[in-house]
């Protein structure tokens, strides 16, 4: 088997997709009658904290995942299948083509996101990305979500740890690739962006845009339409 010599890493929310997976999931659960309308404002408050750089990801996880504590795993799996089907038409053609271009070159591809793994997985499947590095969600002995995070979140500098651990399992390291890309919208991802040979800002926030322009990084503004 030919070993891949190039690595392509993708953030998810506001990078591959022009929306927030957690917000889409919150709206879905409101539609299912699991949450009431106040859940949307609560989630938005967490998003504002994220932009301000003050987000407690553990608190956000408890708020958004905690209400699912008593949902039987088969019911949750059914909801996730429906959720994936609803998102299928919301994938932008431009980012689907971007992922496909890396696949066609034989690059090793992974999504690296702070989004809970169980929510990010349907989108990884839709994009056809085989490797997903995301924030783990703890479960109890019966398989029910507890609302707590399992292990280090895949967030900020921890993203590098997740990538290195994954590559170690494959017998690689970041430095072993001829070229490596990371696509992201957020300045919170600067540690991983600075660790690859080809950082790319996608729909960047103000701080990342300024950093990208100052350092000559490409800035992509893919059309949001699917």
Image (spheres, rainbow, N blue to C red):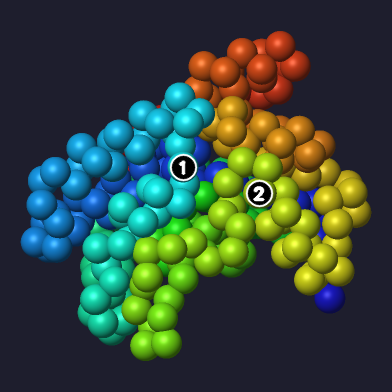
Whether residue 107 appears in this view of the structure is no
Please name the residue shown 43% across and 63% down the image.
148
Image quarter where the N terminus lies is bottom right
Q: Which structural element holds mark 1?
A: loop
Above or below for 18 versus 84: above
Residue of label 2? 159
- Asked whether 21 or 66 is in front, the reply is 66
Left or right: 79 in relation to 114: left
Please name the residue shown 52% across and 58% down the image.
135
> Residue 212, located in which quarter of the rendered image?
top right
Image quarter where the C terminus lies is top left
> Residue 145, located in which quarter of the rendered image?
bottom left
Above or below for 62 versus 146: above
Please name the residue shown 37% across and 64% down the image.
147
Residue 110 at x, y percent in the picture: 63, 57
Of tags 1 and 2, the one toward the viewer is 1
Mark sitting earlier along the chain (1/2): 1
- Packing grade of label 1 (10 A; few <14, some 14-19, many >=20) is few
Above or below for 74 versus 79: below
Residue 56, label in figure: 1
Whether residue 41 appears in this view of the structure is yes
């Amino acid at each position: 088997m030919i070993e891949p010599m190039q690595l392509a890493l993708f953030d998810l929310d506001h990078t591959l997709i022009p929306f927030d997976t957690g917000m889409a999931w919150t709206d879905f659960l409101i539609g299912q009658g699991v949450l009431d309308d106040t859940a949307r404002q609560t989630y938005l408050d967490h998003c504002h904290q994220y932009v301000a750089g003050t987000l407690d990801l553990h608190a956000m996880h408890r708020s958004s995942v905690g209400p699912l504590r008593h949902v039987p795993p088969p019911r949750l799996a059914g909801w996730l299948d429906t959720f994936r089907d609803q998102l299928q038409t919301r994938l932008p053609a431009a980012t689907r083509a971007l992922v496909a271009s890396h696949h066609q070159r034989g690059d090793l591809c992974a999504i690296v996101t702070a989004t809970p793994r169980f929510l990010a997985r349907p989108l990884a499947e839709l994009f056809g990305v085989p490797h997903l590095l995301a924030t783990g969600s703890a479960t109890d002995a019966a398989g029910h979500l507890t609302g707590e995070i399992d292990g280090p979140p895949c967030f900020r500098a921890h993203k590098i740890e997740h990538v290195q651990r994954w590559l170690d399992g494959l017998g690689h390291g970041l430095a072993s690739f001829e070229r490596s890309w990371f696509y992201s919208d957020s300045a919170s991802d600067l540690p991983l962006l600075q660790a690859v040979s080809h950082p790319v800002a996608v729909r960047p926030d103000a701080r990342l845009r300024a950093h990208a322009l100052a350092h000559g990084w490409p800035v992509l503004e893919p059309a949001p339409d699917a």
